[in-house]
Structures are given as C-alpha cells and as structure tokens.
Image (tube, rainbow, N blue to C red):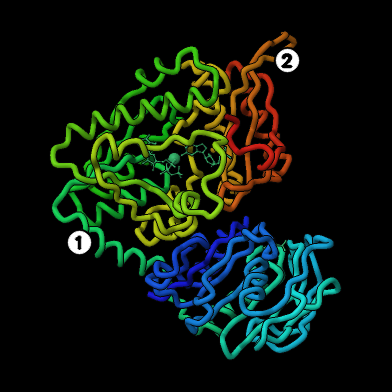
Amino acid sequence: MQKVIILDFGSQYTQLIARRTREAGVYSEIHPCTIPTAELKALEPSAIILSGGPASVSQLDSPGVDADIFGWGLPVLGICYGMQLMTRELGGKIAPALDREYGRSELAFAGPSLLWPEGNGLSVWMSHGDHVLEVPPGFTVTARTGNIDVAAMADPDRKMYALQFHPEVAHTERGDEILRNFLFRVAGLASSWTMSSFVDSMLQALPARIGEDKVVCGLSGGIDSTVVAVLLNKAIGKNLHCIFVDNGLLRAGEGEEVVGYLREHFDLNLHYVKAQDRFLSRLKGLEDPEQKRKVIGYTFIEVFEEEARKIPGVKYLAQGTLYPDVIESVSFKGPSAVIKSHHNVGGLPEKMNLALVEPLRELFKDEVRKVAQELGLPDFIVWRHPFPGPGLAIRVIGEITEPRLEILRQADKIVQHELMASNWYYKVWQGFAVLLPLKTVGVMGDERTYEHVIALRIVDSIDAMTADWSRIPAEILARISNRIINEVKGVNRVVYDISSKPPSTIEWE
Ligand SMILES: Nc1ncnc2c1ncn2[C@@H]1O[C@H](COP(=O)(O)OP(=O)(O)OP(=O)(O)O)[C@@H](O)[C@H]1O
Ligand SMILES: O=c1[nH]c(=O)c2[nH+]cn([C@@H]3O[C@H](COP(=O)(O)O)[C@@H](O)[C@H]3O)c2[nH]1
Ligand SMILES: NC(=O)CC[C@H](N)C(=O)O
Ligand SMILES: [Mg+2]
C-alpha cells in the first residue's frame, strides 16, 4: 500500500498534516523524528513529510534526521522546521530568529512550482523565528513574503520541496491544494485510501488473526465501540461477546436505545450487565473529580473482568482505540500532562492476559464515522455525540446521588430533544447539561424558590483537542431554558457556558 510517512519534530500541527493527506485519499502515518533509519526504511514510504517543530536548527542538540534519507530518491516535503532542517542538511544557510513572524502573511510566488495553484500568490499562515538565508545547491526560491526572501524552495529534479508556512492549517488559503499537489503531482500517488477498502481489508485480516478464538468487547453505545462490535460481528460472528455495563450514570434511555437497535439488526452476543448499585454506592460521598473518575474506572474493570471470566475460551479484548490515542503515545513530545484521568479499560489486558484487538487504531474519528456508514449503521449512531465513560457522574458537579442524577437526566433529555428538533444536534460536536452544586433564589407563581442551577454546554470542535462554544441562536437557548425551568422539578435557573477549550475543557470535571 502506498503510504506517506510524516516525521514529527514536535509541531502542534503534525496531526493536521496526517488528516489532510488522509482526506486527499492517501494513507499516512506519523512517526517520531527519532525513528531509527532502518525502521523508517522498512516502512517502505512512498513519500516523506517533515513537520514543523519548536526547536531551532541552529541549536546544537536540535532534533534531526539521518541525511541518508535525502538520497533515497523519495519525494520529500519540509514544512517550517522541516524546511530549515533540509536547508541545514543539504548545504544551505539559516538565519536565526530576530523577529518572530506569527499569523497571516502574504505570499508571492517567485518561481514556478508544481505545488502552486493558479495565481500569483496566497494568504498563508506563518509561525516561525528562523528562516532560510541561502538555499542549498540544486534548489531555487519559489516564493517570498514581505518579511523573508525564501518562503518556499524546491529542487524538482530530486522531488524535494519546502515551505516556511503551514499548508496544513485552515488559515492558509488553498493549503489543502498545495498538499494535494505534493501528493499527486510531485509524488505521483493515487487517491485510493477509502473507508470501503478499509472495511474490506479488516474483514480479511480479523478472521485470519483471531481464528476460532473468542473475543470480548466493552460496548458503550458510543460510536467507537459500536463500530468495533459491528465490524467484529461481521468478521467472526458468534465468537464475539459484547459486554454492556449499565453503571447508573447513563442518560435517559441511553443503553436501551443502542442495545435495542444492535440486538434487532446484528444478532450480537450481548451481555447486558446491571451494575448501577455497585457504582453508586462506591461514589457515595465523593466530590473530587479525579477521585470520582478513578473509582469509576476501577469499578468498570472489576465488573468487566467478572463478566469476561464467565465466558470460557476468551483470548482477546477488543477496544475502540483511535489514532489520536496512538499518536499521543508515540509523539516526539511524549505523552502530555494528565489533565483528567480519562476512564478506559486499559488496565484489563495485563490482569486478564488478553491480547488486544484494536481495528480502529489507525483511524481518526471522522474516518470511524465513515466506516460506520459503510457498515450500514443508522445516522443516530453515526452522528451520536461522544459520551464520556464516566457518564453523568462528571456532569453532576460534586456529590452524586440518585435524585441529583435524575434532575440532570431530565434536563439533559430536553437539551438533546431541542438540539435535534432545531437541527442543531448535527451541527455541533457535543451538547449537554451540567448540574451545579449550588442553589439560587427565584420566583415562581409569586412564590420564592431556592433551587438548583443547570449549565448548558454546547461546543464546536473537530477532534475535541480544542473547542469553542457554539453560537446557538438565542431563541433555541430561550426555549431550552424555558422548558428546563418549567418541566424539571428542582431547577429555577439555566446558564450558558461561553468558555473555549483551552483554557477551559469541554466537560466540567
Ligand atoms: N457502559 C459501558 N459498558 C461497556 N464498555 C464501556 C462502557 N462505557 C465505555 N466502555 C468502554 O470504554 C471505551 C472507551 O469509551 P469512549 O467513550 O472513549 O468510546 P465510545 O463510547 O466507544 O465512543 P464515544 O467516544 O463516541 O463515546 C469504549 O470503547 C468501551 O469499550
Ligand atoms: O471516554 C471518555 N472517558 C472520559 O473519561 C472522558 N472525559 C472526557 N471525555 C470526552 O473527551 C472529550 C474532551 O473532553 P475534555 O475537554 O473535558 O477533556 C469530550 O468529548 C468529552 O466528553 C471522555 N471520554
Ligand atoms: N513552526 C515551526 O516549525 C517553527 C520552526 C522553528 N522553531 C522557528 O521558529 O523558526
Ligand atoms: Mg463513550
């Protein structure tokens, strides 16, 4: 299979480069720039892209690559730090930072290049301090800006191209075209990475690997685990056992809806485990978000393990791990600081000696949604908002009690319903209600009330890494607020969360 290897030098945009090439129909993988040369060669790249990065190539200990790779005859595209590195390795000169150039810049084409779309220039996104002073032998300057004389360079004979700006970010005008020109015109690749080819290859690879052994899969009703379950069901049929845990922290009707649908259409081995009491009693009295998360994660594993033990002959655990989870652990920057302990079933394998099956580990969320469509899943599953493992527990701020969960469930149901009814559900990344641990004074029917506050959290996002509050029309917000205050007993105030991520996060805990 043709693949582009992206070497990561720690840029915040590396994932975007991978996304853009995938969107163009070319498979790509990110590897840290520290990958040994032999390993890189063994990957049999069809082209290489060098990412940006925070270091300066003029520092002594700055990250580099084995200069041999430039002799492999492969098409290479260097972006920002990647361009500066090519310059250093191939014999050009770099000028260290005097002024940083950050943000929009007007690019003027200075020479023909296979990368350029029609026209004389573009508005592009810059984020750098260093710049190229003298291009390496064989290269010519192909663009400049008011600030720098070498904003792009190329050596077409060796299929080497470099850009000081970032074509992968949305702020760069026609950046996606520039990347596509590299993939198709320079590297001559074919646009053949589609989700139907992915499904076909999985339906061959999974039975070949698993044979007649049994697999367990935690099924949450979320898109990732549902796709894993349906894919495996097609691949190995009755040897798949799905375990759905009702932890008492689900939304109104959450479990029944998805489980009902899957049972009806897919003939799954589905174990529906009721563990509400166990979760709620363990959570009693806890207020600290991290403690709540840890108790839930631990209890999940316990319940899951008990259930899995009841099934003889299980050798594999299937998980809905996606590519961003994988990148996080291979990234050149290393794993990031723990902001929240995300619940997962990652503690299971060692304890249970199960081998992992992760069919989605190369995909981004939008690709998983396409796979779901390929598999014929209905829109209500394909476009379902993500729902965190700890569920409503992290949306009832402070202590979790059944009455408080019930208030939140009712308020949340109204939010979901109104988002659907107004067609906003599919335009936003996620929308939900949060129950705050405080009471405020209100007046209802001339009576004083002293009751709970519900916060609405509705956000736009591409991948949950960053997010902004959705600009929902005021009438819809008004309707949601009205309905919650009138219909949900115990609530007399609704507020709208207008914070972005960062510095806030999507969930409140
Ligand atoms: N209630 C549950 N019962 C069984 N397994 C669960 C449950 N909740 C979460 N899991 C397991 O934890 C994994 C991680 O949850 P996560 O929320 O990230 O994914 P998802 O629910 O499949 O999809 P989404 O991100 O859209 O919610 C799931 O893929 C599933 O295997
Ligand atoms: O499976 C999950 N287990 C968790 O513990 C968890 N915590 C947050 N989320 C979801 O992740 C995305 C980013 O959330 P935050 O901005 O709050 O970190 C949002 O989509 C959140 O809903 C979780 N998903
Ligand atoms: N975004 C980048 O790759 C920056 C490269 C380098 N750190 C510079 O400042 O010039
Ligand atoms: Mg989920």
Measuring from the top left, give residue 77's x and y in whole percent: 59, 75
Image quadrant in which you'd find residue 277 = top left
Q: Residue at x 67, y 30 (%)?
A: 481
Local crowd size for mark 2, using a 10 Å CA cut-off: few (<14), some (14–19), many (≥20) = some
Measuring from the top left, give residue 5's x and y in whole percent: 48, 69
> Is residue 214 among the parts visible in the rendering?
yes
Q: Amino acid at mark 1?
A: Ala
Left or right, 392 with respect to 91, comes to left
Q: Amino acid at mark 2?
A: Gly
Residue nearer the viewer, 298 or 496:
298
Residue 413, placed above or below residue 1: above
Measuring from the top left, give residue 375's x and y in whole percent: 35, 59
Q: Residue furthest top?
A: 447
Q: Residue at x 71, y 81 (%)?
A: 135
Residue nearer the viewer, 496 or 13:
13
Q: Which residue is mark 1?
A: 208
Q: Residue at x 65, y 29 (%)?
A: 455
Image quadrant in which you'd find residue 112 = bottom right
Q: Which residue is mark 2?
A: 442
Point out the tag, 1 or 2, that comes first from the N-terminus.
1
Could you tell me which secondary element the residue under label 1 belongs to? helix
Measuring from the top left, give residue 139's x and y in whole percent: 67, 86
Ligand 3 picture quarter: bottom right
Local crowd size for mark 1, using a 10 Å CA cut-off: few (<14), some (14–19), many (≥20) = few
Residue 424, placed above or below residue 411: below
